[in-house]
Image (cartoon, rainbow, N blue to C red):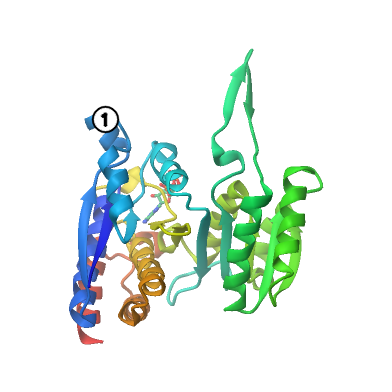
Amino acid sequence: MVYRIAWIKGDGIGPEISEATLNVIEALESKHNLNFSIVFYEAGDLCLSKRGTALPSETVEGFRNADAAIKGPVGETSMDVTVKLRQIFDLYANIRPVKNFPNIECVKNIDVVIVRENSEDLYKGLEFEIDNIAFALRIVSDYATKRIARVAGEIACKRSGLVTIVHKSNVLRKTCGLFSRVAKEELSKYPVKVNEMYVDAASAVLIRSPEKFDVILTTNMFGDILSDEAAQIAGSLGIGPSANIGEEKAFFEPIHGAAPDIAGKNIANPYAMILSFKMLMEWLSEKKNDQRLKEAAYTLESAVVEALKMGYKTPDIGGNKKTDEIGHLLHKLIENL
Ligand code: ATP
């Protein structure tokens, strides 16, 4: 069985971290007898300047026809590419697991999954300006809250079974009020414990006592901010993967941006992109009921752990290795695992 993967390399460090990931995938294919047919598509800032559009229609069609998709970061066109793709394919669940890896200096020990509603809130992009006053509409629906609460419930059942709903219903009484009420109703159908916390308190507790959280369920913008904070508690943005998941489609991406300040220097941390591919294989494994993909995901994570123990780290996490050296080492480790 050949799996079709649509791939956007993206801007800034996107091409470098993509190359390192592709090197690793080659080794996984031979080891686990897998066959990925990878097709590259353009999108992002460079694409906009070259072609006049940040998200060409063939890229959208490529995503539509693929079994799964992965993208590197895009720069200023994130709203036109990342947010647009989420909207087109109704990828309503943004899943960001955050945990420590060996040999990476961290703020605290942390092991949480942030489940962020990905289709509504202020990121719906409904903004306008009248008489020098700018407005943004915040949308939170019963429908979207229910379906994201179910995702959090299912994930929590496979973990320690605690969901913390993060909102700000004391101020945003309608939007956050609905989110809190509907999420609690939906989660009452799962064998999980449910807590609630205001977002300002949650951001403080996340730094002080991250062990108080297991699954964090929150709205789009709060989730965006809390997940960068959580990634930094684990050590770096450069190791954080994420998934954008809908009923049928999904794409995976590192949580960091295009990092133009270090682009082209071969020092970008490729682990977030590599671990995003791991999440892709786990998702595809369930979808296609293919155990080989799950095993390949396990192999990949074991190789990452081993590489970090060996000190294969880029400067952002205190090492001096190059992006491509990490790709080569992981390739070798996977061959020998
Ligand atoms: P965005 O708004 O798209 O998230 P940003 O400029 O706010 O973009 P990043 O591009 O993620 O944020 O960069 C923030 C900082 O983190 C920069 O100094 C960048 O060099 C660093 N950084 C981000 N990703 C990586 C990575 N993979 N490896 C090393 N450093 C990184």
Q: Nearer the viewer, residue 128 or 263?
A: 128
Which residue position holds label 1? Answer: 49
Assign the C terminus to one quadrant of the image: bottom left
Assign the N terminus to one quadrant of the image: bottom left
What residue is rendered at 39% in x and 70% in y? 287
Q: Position of residue 163 (x, y in %)?
A: 68, 68
| Picture quadrant of residue 313 | bottom left
Q: Nearer the viewer, residue 257 or 119?
A: 119
Q: Residue furthest bottom?
A: 337
Q: Residue flagged by tag 1: what amino acid is it?
A: Ser
Q: Position of residue 179 (x, y in %)?
A: 71, 52
| Picture quadrant of residue 266 | bottom left
Q: Residues within 10 Å of mark 1 (few under 14, many from 20)?
A: few
What residue is rendered at 74% in x and 69% in y? 188
Q: Residue furthest top?
A: 131
| Picture quadrant of residue 271 | bottom left
Q: In the shown orientation, is residue 157 left or right of residue 182?
A: left
